[in-house]
Amino acid sequence: MKLLDYINLCYIWISSYPRLRKIWSHQVQQNTGQPVRVNYGFDRVPGPSEHVFGGLVKLQDLNNAFPHYTTHPNILYLVSSALPYFPVRLALMAQRAGAKIVVNQNGVAYPAWFGDGWERENRSMARLHSMADYVFYQSEFCCLSAERFLGERPALPSEILYNPVDTEIFSPNLDNTSAKDNIILLLSGSHWTRYRVNTALETLQKVRVHNQQISLKIAGRFCWCDEEQALSEVTEYAHQLGISDHVFVSGSYTQEQAPVLLNSCSILLHTKYNDPCPRLVVEAMACGLPIVYSATGGVPELVGEEGGVGVPGLLDWEKDHPPDADSLSEAVLQVVRDLPKYSVAARQRAVSLLDRKGWIRRHCEVFASLV
């Protein structure tokens, strides 16, 4: 860590300590029938009209049912992919006050995607993982990777609870006929590595050899370098592949805008290797988009046999293995041939397995059992 970064962190801790001490100075009286009062580790939870990504979206969901308390909370709820500053110190303060700690565990750092320093990146997560009174793993893959890189939790309570979706807000737009006339592939999310975008562009090139009615929309942030430079790289590669006229970049979007974006497309193309439990996949299925994806990580658990077509990949902690564009193009064409069937099946799976109501209900039960 650079000296300036360290000084900044020290300043953040010193300036925030009085506020945190005030929040957690009250001794919690457990098991007295008092209502659940959840704190999420931040000053506030962003609203749905704000640009957020990753774990913060789950806090938006939960905040509707369990408002964020900054006075006398009895549960500290932390999402591993969106931790606040100094999460371990925060958890220790909560623990000393008698509050219970619940961790929503996403993926972890490991050599393949994180590179050097992955052990250091895992330290806070590992400590929280061992301290937590309860852990929600976002998928079986999340549980597997956490036990391997963070440590096991013998005899401590936990469960698998997939990321949720509000199937009333995220639902098919039956009046939208444009996506039926022209097949639009959607690549979306936060693109931390260039291969995700390049693989999608290569897939489109191969698909258009067989079907000229297919195009690609790319939404979300380019994160592997400066965004303007990344856009230039994407534009140049699309030009080299001869598909520039069929690739459209729409940029980042809010949760409120997400249903409209998804309903403007036909198929979600998810090229990330070993994605632990992408919320995007769940939301796309709820809108009736079949998923064509790298069948690695936790995505196969979400999509199942009926919600789309996956391209198999091996499990490797040391190296990423992007899905093959030829195989992805075959999967796209397979889905296109029976698009209505896949669309209905994806929607049905989201409603039956991944609906937000069941996710909230399970949190209610766990929170009640803890306090």
Image (tube, grey):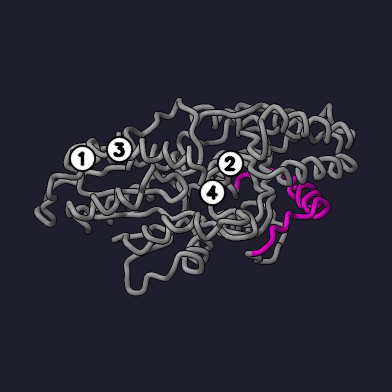
Say whether disc 3 or disc 1 marks the residue closer to the N-terminus. Answer: 3
In the picture of the structure, the residue carrying the numbered disc 3 is 14
- Look at discs 2 and 3 and give the one toward the viewer: 3
In the picture of the structure, the residue carrying the numbered disc 1 is 23
In the picture of the structure, the residue carrying the numbered disc 4 is 348
Say whether disc 2 or disc 3 marks the residue closer to the N-terminus. Answer: 3
User: Which segment is the magenta one?
Assistant: 318-344
Tell me if residue 188 comes above or below residue 157 in the rendering: above
In front of the other: 254 or 120: 120
Principal secondary structure, stretch drawn in magenta: helix
Q: Label 4 amino acid?
A: Gln
- Look at discs 3 and 4 and give the one toward the viewer: 3
Q: To which quarter of the image does residue 311 belong? A: bottom right
The furthest residue to the front: 3
Assess whether residue 232 is covered by the magenta stretch: no
Q: Secondary structure at mark 1?
A: helix
> How far apart are the alpha carbons under marks 3 and 1?
15 Å
In the picture of the structure, the residue carrying the numbered disc 2 is 284
Q: Label 2 amino acid?
A: Ala
- Look at discs 1 and 4 and give the one toward the viewer: 1
Assess whether residue 343 is covered by the magenta stretch: yes
Q: Secondary structure at mark 4?
A: helix
Classify residue 254 as left or right of residue 203: left
The local crowd at label 1, few if under 14, some if 14 to 19, many if 20 or more residues have their Cα within 10 Å, is some
For image coordinates 32% across by 60% down, the residue present is 132
Q: Label 1 amino acid?
A: Ile
Residue 200, percent across and down?
A: 75, 43
In front of the other: 246 or 224: 224
> How far apart are the alpha carbons under marks 1 and 4?
43 Å
For image coordinates 55% across by 48% down, the residue present is 278
Say whether disc 1 or disc 2 marks the residue closer to the N-terminus. Answer: 1
Q: Label 3 amino acid?
A: Ile
